[in-house]
Image: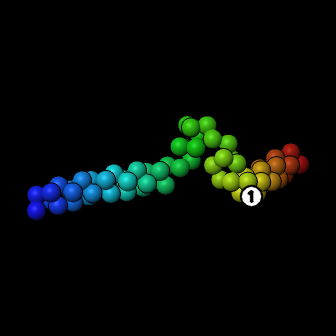
């Protein structure tokens, strides 16, 4: 019984840590990306990086006109 109790406590502790880290990672994802110096392609994948690049280029063109 004691072994199972210890196992359950350890499991709950691990799940809580994972849940907390996932929550903060999801909430502050843009800050993580900037502080860890990931490129858009590394962070979002090739397709979304291309879309973001197109959107940024369009904004630049529109602001210059």
Q: List x then y, in percent, for residue 4.
A: 17, 61
Look at the image and tell me whether residue 33 can be seen.
yes
Asked if residue 18 lies left or right of residue 64, the reply is left
Q: List x then y, in percent, for residue 19.
A: 37, 57
Q: Residue furthest right?
A: 65
Q: How many marks?
A: 1
Asked if residue 15 lies left or right of residue 32, the reply is left
Q: Residues within 10 Å of mark 1 (few under 14, many from 20)?
A: few
* Quarter placement of the N terminus: bottom left
Q: Residue furthest left?
A: 1
Q: How is the image coloured?
A: rainbow
Quarter holding residue 33: top right
Q: List x then y, in percent, for residue 3.
A: 15, 57
**52 or 36: nearer the viewer:** 36
Instruction: Name the secondary structure under disc 1.
Output: helix
Q: Which residue is mark 1?
A: 47
Quarter holding residue 51: bottom right
Q: Residue at x 68, y 54 (%)?
A: 45
Asked if residue 1 lies left or right of residue 65, the reply is left
Above or below — where is 49 with respect to 33? below
Q: List x then y, in percent, for residue 54.
A: 80, 54
**10 or 28: nearer the viewer:** 10
Q: Residue at x 86, y 49 (%)?
A: 61
Look at the image and tell me whether residue 16 can be seen.
no
């Amino acid at each position: 019984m004691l072994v199972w109790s210890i196992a359950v406590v350890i499991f709950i502790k691990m799940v809580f840590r994972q849940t907390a880290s996932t929550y903060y990672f999801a909430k502050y994802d843009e800050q993580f990306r900037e502080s860890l110096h990931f490129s858009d392609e590394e962070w979002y994948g090739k397709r979304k990086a291309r879309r973001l690049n197109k959107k940024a280029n369009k904004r630049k063109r529109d602001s210059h006109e």
